[in-house]
Image (cartoon, helix red, strand yellow):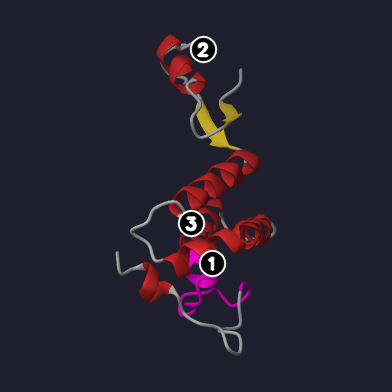
């Protein structure tokens, strides 16, 4: 019996399996999103933001020019938490926090960055978060 299915964020297979219940009503199948799909969906959503004119051109250009850096920030967080020796629930919570904070980090706001992730603002770095949050 398989209790986990790796798929993309838009997968309807898990829903269908949980409707059909191939292993009986007491056995639910859990969907796990793979890193590749997660990263592709993340970059697609960032690209969509660059098309929204309610954001300033400065922020939109910055996102466009740094999409791979946004992506590598997430990859760095995943790798870090994969290798930590803490309970799974804590890994998940800390990874969730790091992913949520990664956009702020990349836009130049470092107050919530974990120590392993960042040592603070770089010389000459501009905090674009206030500009991005104007909308």
The location of residue 130, given as percent across then percent down, is 36, 75
Query: Mark 3 highlights which residue?
Result: 96
Left/right placement of residue 33 relative to residue 83 reads left
Looking at marks 2 and 1 on the same chain, the residue that comes earlier in the sequence is marked by 2
Which residue lies under the disc numbered 1?
A: 62
Residue depth check, mark 3 versus mark 1: number of the one nearer the observer: 1
Q: Which residues are magenta?
A: 101-117
Q: Is residue 92 left or right of residue 1?
A: left
| Residue 111 locus on image (x, y percent) | 46, 80
Q: Secondary structure at mark 1?
A: helix
Say which residue appears at 60% left-offset and 39% top-offset. 37
Magenta span contains residue 92: no
Q: Is residue 116 above or below residue 37?
A: below
Gap in Å between the C-alphas at discs 2 and 1?
49 Å
Q: Which mark is residue 23?
A: 2
Assign a secondary structure to mark 3: helix
Instruction: Residue 114: name its quadrant.
Output: bottom right
């Amino acid at each position: 019996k398989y209790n986990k299915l790796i798929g993309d964020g838009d997968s309807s297979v898990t829903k269908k399996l949980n409707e059909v219940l191939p292993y009986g009503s007491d056995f639910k199948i859990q969907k796990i999103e793979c890193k590749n799909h997660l990263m592709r969906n993340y970059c697609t959503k960032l690209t969509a933001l660059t098309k929204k004119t309610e954001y300033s051109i400065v922020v939109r250009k910055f996102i466009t020019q740094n999409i791979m850096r946004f992506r590598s920030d997430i990859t760095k967080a995943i790798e870090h938490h994969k290798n930590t020796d803490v309970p799974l629930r804590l890994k998940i919570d800390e990874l969730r926090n790091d992913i949520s904070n990664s956009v702020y980090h990349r836009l130049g706001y470092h107050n919530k960055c974990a120590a392993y992730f960042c040592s603070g603002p770089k010389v000459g770095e501009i905090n674009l978060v206030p500009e991005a949050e104007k909308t």
